Image (cartoon, rainbow, N blue to C red):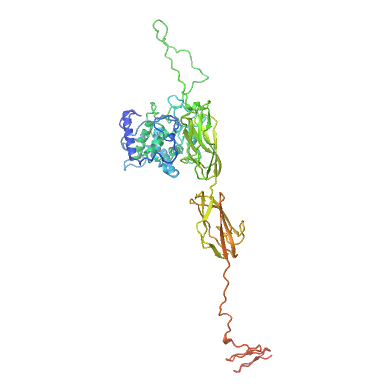
């Protein structure tokens, strides 16, 4: 916190009062709280209270900036052009660097699509980014959003901070002894290992990239289906990031400020805050907000033991010299519950089964124990879905971290099977300590039906060469309930046969070809399956349509193809025309009264009475 009053406030009574007012105003503007029994199966660890133990937070409860926003409005004047600093808005102190602001907005947009029920405002990500790192060290980032130098929190060695032993071999924080919070959103390495995201699409998950870190922070805050549009949901989410009531109040004050309006400033021009929650001063213009690890003395050049030249120290009464005061030794790091864990034991079943899309009937649980077999409470157990399955815990995450209870037991959130069938595993590990992991085997069976029935009783008949008037529709059920998304096949055969026939009724494929076997069919969410239209060729007879689903349910429907009706002759056809003459008994044709020629048996033609010529043999 700066030492100035007015545009910035001194930490203390004024700080607390203004934060309380901001929190009250923000809480009053939010939607009514959800009930305590909202979906998700949350444990006590899922709903943190303020000022609680250090386990289970994104940052390891590292220190944060405590500066509060100014009292004047951040909204720019309508006459100002975009990108300029609004009059009286705090300038670089309260503006958000362009790339950093873009990262917050892109992360919020992505969450609208993937977790719409979370209702994540980008201003909340901006408020946390302000409190954690002063907006990525004042926006000191490259064009792709990567900080120009790493942002590292203090060493979490238990001296004034949490005691978190190294979990990443120094990959993120360059410390192989203890962990440190990393990047503009200050994730500890063990949290980033499962919460990290690729926000800028470069194929990497980098905690020092503001796009990656902002998206990861959003998913972390939304991981238990907490709704940011409610007071209780937002409170639980913020306190899960850093378990401190003052942290919560400070974040809300910046959230309220940014919601009233903000302005964009060029990258690298933001000013860092001035006060930290651990009582230290901010780092001013230093790119990293926290001090690096102390550099140990060189092993090759021991410090000199020869006192420097100059006046001798003043004498003590009675002779001798005054010894300089000795520096008290650094106290050893306190032992944490995690340090006492020797192994993990399965506290429930290690084999789970479920049908695709359904919740597993049992929850996975693990017990942290000492070497003597005593349960250890307040230890973080991480459950991770591995093995290529698409199952997920409540909230859609593949990783869940849960605190053990007083008996040392941690119960994972409810696990729901995806659509992929087969076997996968869930690993349980101790966060902050290397002990053998537990493996839980989970099997996902295909959706099944145990009964099939037609939705209509209309007889299925058709004339050869025609098409059936009704399409066949069936409903699949399992134990009396609709069996949705169940795989099915349909086969046409002759009566008494079981294999696809080469004649009789048929379906048409996309190209119009005749097919008598369909695969890859699937019932809808209500268990209904409507088959394509049926046609008949020229072969009359009785045929069978068989529909079979996963799980063994089969329905056989009879199809009747009738022959075309015989053609009835026209009564007018075959009747002699009186005008065409009378047959001659001798075989010739007599002359018609009108004087037409007649033919004699010998083939001659006689003359008609009218004088027509006749032809003889």
Q: Position of residue 285 (x, y in %)?
A: 40, 30
330 lies left or right of 8 = right
Q: Is residue 97 left or right of residue 167?
A: left
Task: Give the image quarter of residue 64.
Answer: top left
Question: Is residue 452 depicted above or below 15 in this figure?
Answer: below
Which residue, as the protein is rendered here, is positioned at the far top? 318
Asked if one can make out residue 170 in the rendered structure from this viewpoint, the answer is no
Can residue 302 be seen by looking at this rendering? yes
Q: Based on the displayed image, in which of its 4 quarters is residue 66 positioned? A: top left
Of residues 467 and 265, the one drawn nearer to the viewer in this rendering: 467
For the residue pair 70 and 493, the one nearer the viewer reads as 493
Q: Residue furthest front?
A: 480
Q: Residue 132 versus residue 271: which sits nearer the camera?
A: 132
Q: Nearer the viewer, residue 498 or 300?
A: 498
Determine the image quadrant of residue 539: bottom right
Residue 93 at x, y = what percent? 36, 34
- Location of the C terminus by quadrant is bottom right
Residue 488 position, x and y percent, is: 55, 52
Numbered circles on residues, count: 0
| Residue at (32% x, 33% y) in the render | 20
Check the picture and name the quadrant holding the N terminus.
top left
Q: Position of residue 296 (x, y in %)?
A: 49, 22
């Amino acid at each position: 916190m700066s030492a100035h009053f007015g545009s910035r406030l001194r930490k203390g009574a004024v700080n607390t009062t203004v934060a309380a007012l901001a929190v009250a105003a923000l809480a009053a503007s939010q939607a009514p709280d959800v009930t305590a029994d909202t979906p998700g199966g949350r444990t006590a660890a899922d709903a943190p209270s303020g000022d609680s133990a250090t386990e289970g937070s994104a940052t390891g409860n590292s220190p944060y900036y405590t500066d509060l926003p100014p009292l004047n409005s951040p909204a720019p004047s309508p006459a100002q052009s975009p990108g300029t600093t609004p009059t009286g808005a705090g300038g670089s102190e309260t503006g958000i660097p362009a790339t950093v602001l873009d990262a917050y907005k892109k992360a919020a947009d992505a969450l609208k699509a993937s977790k719409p029920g979370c209702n994540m405002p980008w201003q909340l990500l901006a408020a946390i980014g302000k409190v954690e790192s002063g907006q990525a060290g004042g926006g000191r980032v490259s064009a792709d959003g990567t900080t120009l130098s790493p942002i590292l929190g203090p060493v979490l060695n238990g001296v004034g901070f949490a005691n978190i032993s190294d979990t990443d071999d120094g990959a993120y924080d360059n410390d192989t002894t203890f962990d440190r919070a990393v990047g503009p959103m200050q994730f500890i390495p063990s949290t980033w290992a499962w919460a990290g995201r690729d926000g800028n699409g470069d194929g990497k998950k980098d905690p020092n990239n503001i796009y990656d870190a902002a998206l990861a922070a959003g998913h972390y805050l939304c991981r238990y289906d907490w709704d940011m549009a409610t007071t209780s949901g937002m409170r639980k989410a913020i306190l899960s990031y850093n378990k401190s009531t003052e942290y919560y109040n400070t974040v809300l004050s910046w959230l309220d400020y940014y919601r009233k309006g903000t302005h964009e400033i060029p990258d690298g021009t933001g000013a860092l805050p001035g006060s930290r929650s651990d009582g230290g001063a901010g780092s001013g213009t230093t790119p990293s907000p926290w001090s690096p690890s102390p550099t140990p003395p060189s092993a090759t050049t021991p410090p000199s033991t020869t006192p420097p030249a100059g006046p001798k120290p003043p004498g003590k009464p009675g002779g001798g010299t005054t010894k300089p005061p000795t520096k008290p030794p650094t106290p050893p790091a306190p032992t944490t519950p995690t340090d006492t864990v020797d192994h993990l034991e399965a506290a429930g079943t290690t084999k789970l089964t479920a049908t695709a899309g359904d919740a597993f009937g049992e929850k996975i649980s693990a017990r942290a124990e000492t070497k003597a077999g005593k349960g250890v409470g307040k230890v973080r157990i991480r459950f991770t879905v591995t093995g290529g399955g698409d199952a997920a815990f409540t909230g859609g995450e593949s990783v869940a971290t849960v605190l053990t209870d007083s008996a040392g037991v941690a119960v994972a959130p409810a696990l729901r099977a995806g659509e992929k069938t087969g076997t996968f595993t869930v690993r349980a590990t101790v966060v902050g300590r290397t002990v053998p992991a537990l493996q839980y085997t989970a099997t996902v069976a295909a959706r099944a039906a145990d009964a099939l029935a037609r939705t209509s009783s209309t007889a299925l008949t058709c004339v050869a060469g025609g098409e059936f008037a009704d399409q066949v529709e069936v409903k699949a059920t399992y134990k009396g309930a609709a069996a949705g998304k169940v795989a099915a096949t349909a086969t046409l055969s002759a009566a008494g046969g079981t294999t696809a026939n080469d004649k009789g009724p048929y379906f048409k494929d996309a190209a119009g070809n005749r097919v008598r076997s369909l695969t890859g069919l699937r019932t809808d969410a209500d268990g209904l399956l409507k088959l394509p239209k049926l046609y008949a060729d020229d072969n009359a007879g009785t045929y069978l349509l068989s529909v079979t689903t996963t799980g063994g349910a089969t329905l056989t429907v009879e199809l009747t193809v009738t022959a075309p009706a015989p053609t009835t002759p026209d009564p007018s056809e075959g009747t002699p025309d009186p005008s065409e003459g009378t047959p001659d008994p001798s075989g010739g044709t007599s002359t018609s009264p009108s004087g037409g020629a007649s033919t004699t048996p010998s083939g001659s033609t006689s003359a008609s009475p009218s004088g027509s010529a006749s032809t003889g043999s």
